[in-house]
Amino acid sequence: MKRYRTWANLLFWIVVSFLTMFPIYWLFVISVKPAVELFSTPDVILKSVYWKNYINVLNDETLRGYMANSLIISTGNAVLVTILGFLACYALSRFNLGGKESIFFWTITNRMAPPAVFLLPLFLLLTQVYRVGDFTLLDSKIGMILVYCTFNLPFAIWTLRPTLDSIPKELDEAAFVDGASAWTVITEIVLPLARPGVAVTLILTWVFAWNEYLLAATLTNFNARTLTTGLSEYVTTTGTEWGVMATISVFTLIPALIIFSLVQRHIVAGLTFGAVKG
């Protein structure tokens, strides 16, 4: 019976893996097919590869600019959110703040709200409140980095707090007795122990900012336009360039796949770091 159960589990995960990976494989198939073949009888197995879509995308200066914007915005937001989230969780974990559980719950409710609710307030903030002369944060990389903090910072706090709670406070107290400053305790004691949770937060917030579409499509025009919003430019009244759209989608997948493959060990450790509290 145990042997059959093992084979059943193996078969189950093979089916799940196939269902998960097949859309990605089919996306790649669409990206390496000429436009004429896309509307013919689809072939699951590739018989020939058409690389012109990739060449066109790589040679497109506008798309390269969109990719650079996505990298700057997602990286800047991930770093800023992780730093702020870590410091906020340290305060919630170490200090006896009145109503800190209510503060923690309030941050989570901000993450639960749909992004469309914040479109109008964010637009007004970027165009009116944060205005310096003729300069506004609308359609700027700094503006998008700050906008994404609205949604990614609550997630970072929610992710990092169990990690900080799992680190004994006695380590801080012992360091203070030895004359260490608060900054020394944070950077040399707490941060190294919380590295798995910090890595998970950094990667997930980076992916969220990299993949986001609605806010970027509404609050950017050209200067800060991201790669995901560039897809909409290929849906026109004369037709849809499916091959180019699939190629751009493949390019959006590559950075996330590389990062996840490099830090997979830290992701698993970070997600389980606060599961058992000593």
Image (cartoon, rainbow, N blue to C red):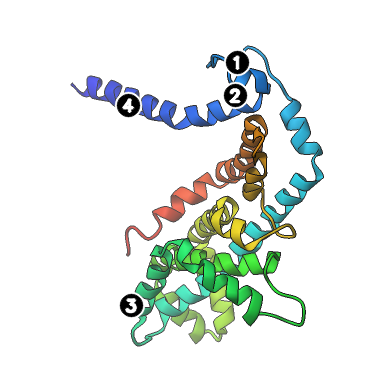
Amino acid type, residue under disc 1 in the picture: Leu
Who is closer to the viewer here, 12 or 122?
A: 122
**Callout 3 amino acid:** Glu
Q: How far apart are marks 3 and 4 (CA)?
A: 41 Å
Q: At x 73% / y 24%, what residue is drawn? A: 51
* Front: mark 2 or 3: 2
Looking at the picture, which amino acid does disc 4 mark?
A: Phe
- Which label number is shown at residue 101? 3
Mark carried by residue 12? 4
Task: Tell which residue pokes out farthest to the left in this image.
Answer: 1
Q: How far apart are marks 2 and 1 (CA)?
A: 7 Å
Point out residue 7 in the picture as x, y percentages from the top left corner: 29, 21
- The secondary element bearing badge 4 is classed as helix
Residue located beneath label 2 in the image:
29
User: Which mark, by number, is residue 46?
Assistant: 1
Q: In this view, does 96 lie to the left or right of 154?
A: left
Q: Depth-wise, is mark 1 or mark 4 nearer the camera?
A: 1
Residue 59 placed where, x, y %?
Answer: 81, 37
Task: Inspect this view and state whether residue 127 appears.
Answer: yes
Q: Earlier in the sequence, mark 2 or mark 4?
A: 4
Asked whether the residues under the numbered discs 2 and 1 touch, taking CB atoms below 8 Å apart as contact, a structural biologist would say yes
Choose mark 1 or mark 3, whichever is in front.
1
